[in-house]
Amino acid sequence: MNPTTDRPRTATLVASLTEAPSASGNEVRALSDLADCLEVRADLVGAIDPAWLRERFAGELLYTLRSEAEGGRGPVDADRRQELLAAGAVYDLVDLEADRDLVFGVLDAVEPRRRLVSWHGRAGHVKALRSRLKQASATEARLYKLVTAAERSGEELVPLELLLGAGREDVVAFSMGAVGAWTRLVAPRLGAPWVYGAAGSVAAAPGQPSVERLRADYGLPNLPPVARLFGVVGHPAAHSMSPRLHNAGYRDRGEAALYVAFDAPSFETFWEEVVLSDFLERAGLPLGGLSVTAPHKAAALAAASEAGDAAVRTAGANTLLPAPGAAVGRRWRAESTDPEGIVGPLRRRGIETAGRAALVIGAGGAGRAAVAGLVAAGAEVSLANRTVEAGEAAAESLAVTFVPLAELDPGPFDIVVNATSLGGRPGDPLPCDPDALRPSAVGVELVYGGGPTPWSRALGARGVTVVGGREVLLHQGLAQFEAMTGGPLPFDVGADALGLESMR
């Protein structure tokens, strides 16, 4: 039996309440439409009357008193814990820490069907975690939760290995931390019945996404069959909107696939410990392709066995695909769809590029890709960069003109691309003076987030046409999706996923 390709299932979504609710409790009411269970982190918000909560939340209530020993703020003292947990026994479920709460007074107050026995800590090998599960399982409970801390790629595989071999439906196991965040999405495909998400803006544990994001990006609580795993590799990676885009495409096309965000502090370690590991293949989740973002594009190109022209020209890969005919996971081909991210939105808007004067600010991987795309589209391109030596080297390799950023006058250019992080946040210096651009110019912003950047807003105020970062992401993602799956992601589906309904 392959748990990842069996009939569709659903997960129980648990919303972790880490901030005291308002007097009206309207935010708790809203959670009734998002989650099946409300976890009250009593170590963070104190005791909340369950009767008050039940008037506002339709699902089950879980009382958790996470101790300081396991990453929370709750007491470790046995007597104090016993007093607080006994008071919490009026909830539907009570989280009991395996190392300190399985004592007569607590177990007598919390009957087995309302117990969730948990453990949080480091486990370097699956044998150690199996021992923890055996110890916890000696106490009768509804669920057993084992969460490991991962700091280095490969460490997050331990709880997934536990699930793969356990064959149980009462074990929740995943890895916390940025490196382990993706295991929260894979764990339910291996039998874990619950998925935890933050109820609000404050996560209950490192790497915990919000319940809203679990639903919007990953389609939870639904668990359709998955036969292939895809993902974006970066550091950081949690902010990426690529999972929302690609997973929307899978749902639209009926693809048995899942796309996650891999946070990898070291690309080389991720490559050795995750990509070249046999675990995902044994789990029935072979890697079908990887998106690559900063700062790993050059390392991704170096790891590949072969490379396409765009990846070679831009000195970096934003896409890795299994090489045709190669054994699963052993040989990879590097590609880059980043140039299409620049020229695609211009083409769709009907903006002519051939013969136009274009300026790219930034000589990193994103800037090189923008230059390559614009040159291929017939533009006359100049490259500006703050560091002269790096800018000159990039311009020479791409056969374009270099302009030191300190001497830049953007006025003569028809198209100006910001391929830096400058101007992305309030108070940041802008990549160039917006007032220096002609109103007839076009600005292309690669940064995306919750809304237009300060640079984009300043350009828009002058009447300059602005191509936003989400448009860039969409167009490179459309090309990437087809390269990975062999089929197109409909433009309307992608635009809706990224909140670009006006672009349809």
Image (tube, grey):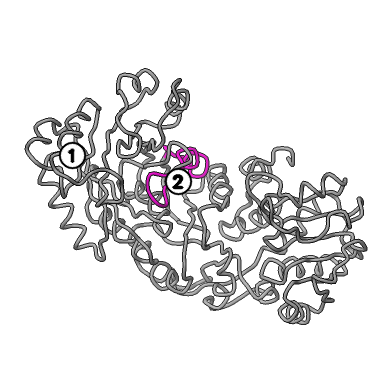
In this rendered view, identify the residue nearer to me: 181 or 66: 66
Left/right of residue 196 with respect to residue 372 in the rendered view:
left
Q: Distance between the residues labelled 1 and 2?
A: 28 Å
Residue where numbered disc 1 is placed: 81
Q: Do the residues labelled 1 and 2 touch (CB within 8 Å)?
A: no
Residue type, label 2: Pro
Residue where numbered disc 2 is placed: 209
Magenta stretch: give its range: 203-222
Residue 219: say if magenta.
Answer: yes
Instruction: Give above or below for 154 relative to 248.
Output: below
Residue 168: say if magenta.
Answer: no
Q: Which image quadrant: the C terminus? A: top right
Residue 47: image location, x then y, percent? 29, 30
Q: How many residues crowd around disc 1 within 10 Å: few (fewer than 14), some, or many (20 or more)?
A: many
Residue type, label 1: Arg
Q: Which residue lies furthest to the left in this view?
A: 104
